[in-house]
Image (tube, coloured by chain):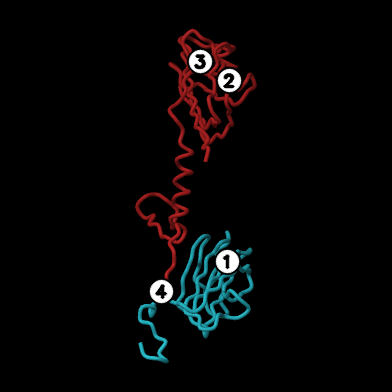
Amino acid sequence: MGSGIGYDPELSDVTNEAYISNAITVTTTQSEAKAGANRLIGREVLTIHNNGNATIYYGPTGVTAITGTPLYKDQFVSLPVGDKIGVFLITLSGTANVRIQEFA
Amino acid sequence: MSKGPIYKSPVARGVPFDNSTNGFTATETQAAIEEAKLVASNASRGPTVCGFDGNASNGRWLEFYSNNPSNNNPFIVSEPSELVALSVSASANATGTVTVFKNGISLTTISLSAARKNRIKGLALSLTDLDEISVQITSGSISRPNVYLFIRTLPSF
């Protein structure tokens, strides 16, 4: 591999720069699915695991329980979204403990 | 982790259930499984039978086993259960009342009024281990009565 070239084809289909994780509480007011104060720079994958009893709904900002996609208790979703796109979460009622992971 | 397409893990609540041919009301799998459990747990076993081989008049204790009046030889409940229904038959039209006792206390009654049969359903009378069930004619008289007790075991899960 030539100098100055950082591309490794063996790692071209995986994320290999950063990995963070956190738990957030989702309520009837939308909150963004991110593990830190800001989206992980260079994010390539966002995972959301509903660790609570209430169904949560995910979607772009402005999401509601009517417009969002449901994520039921113990269900997990992996979204290939970068740091330019915000994914927001909301419940219809009650709160849910949700585990967020971001990969870059 | 591979970036790949969106992946969402399957859970029973998110799996559709087709109820168009099976009598279920559920439309998703979680609810269907819970509905099946409810139906199964509400099913009773075959009846426990007591009777008397003759004209049973007021005061007569019916027998779960021939020549063993149930006040002396009651039916012993073996596990947490419910009496969910009972019925009575007679060899001829009769007027009388049957009382089912639990541990000597009236649990429920069923009557005939110039009839040979009657039934009560939709009960949920609690029974527990070692309860003693005895059955007596408490008014009128009934010819060769048979009383059928439908008992279901309460689910332990």
Counting other residues with Cα less than 10 Å from the Cα at mark 2, is it few (<14), some (14-19), or many (20 or more)? many
Q: Give the CA distance from mark 3 to mark 1.
A: 67 Å
Secondary structure at numbered mark 3: strand
Co-location on one chain, circles 2 and 1: no
Q: Give the CA distance from mark 1 to mark 4.
A: 22 Å
Residue at image mark 4:
B2
Say which chain is red.
B
| Nearer to the camera, A95 or B6 | B6
Between circles 1 and 4, the one closer to the viewer is 4
Co-location on one chain, circles 3 and 2: yes
Between circles 3 and 1, the one closer to the viewer is 1
Q: Amino acid at mark 3?
A: Ile
Callout 3: residue from which chain? B
Determine which quarter of the picture holds residue A31.
bottom right
Q: Quadrant of the N terminus of chain A?
A: bottom left
Residue at image mark 1:
A98
| Nearer to the camera, A22 or B56 | A22
* Contact (Cβ within 8 Å) of mark 3 with mark 2: no
Co-location on one chain, circles 1 and 4: no
Residue at image mark 2:
B132
Residue at image mark 3:
B142
Secondary structure at numbered mark 4: loop
The disc, 4 or 2, on the residue closer to the chain's N-terminal end is 4
* Contact (Cβ within 8 Å) of mark 1 with mark 4: no
Residue ID at (60%, 64%): A97
Q: Position of residue B65 (x, y in %)?
A: 47, 13
Q: Colour of chain A?
A: cyan
Callout 4: residue from which chain? B
| Nearer to the camera, A13 or B110 | A13
Between circles 4 and 2, the one closer to the viewer is 4
Q: Position of residue A63 (x, y in %)?
A: 56, 76
Between circles 2 and 1, the one closer to the viewer is 1
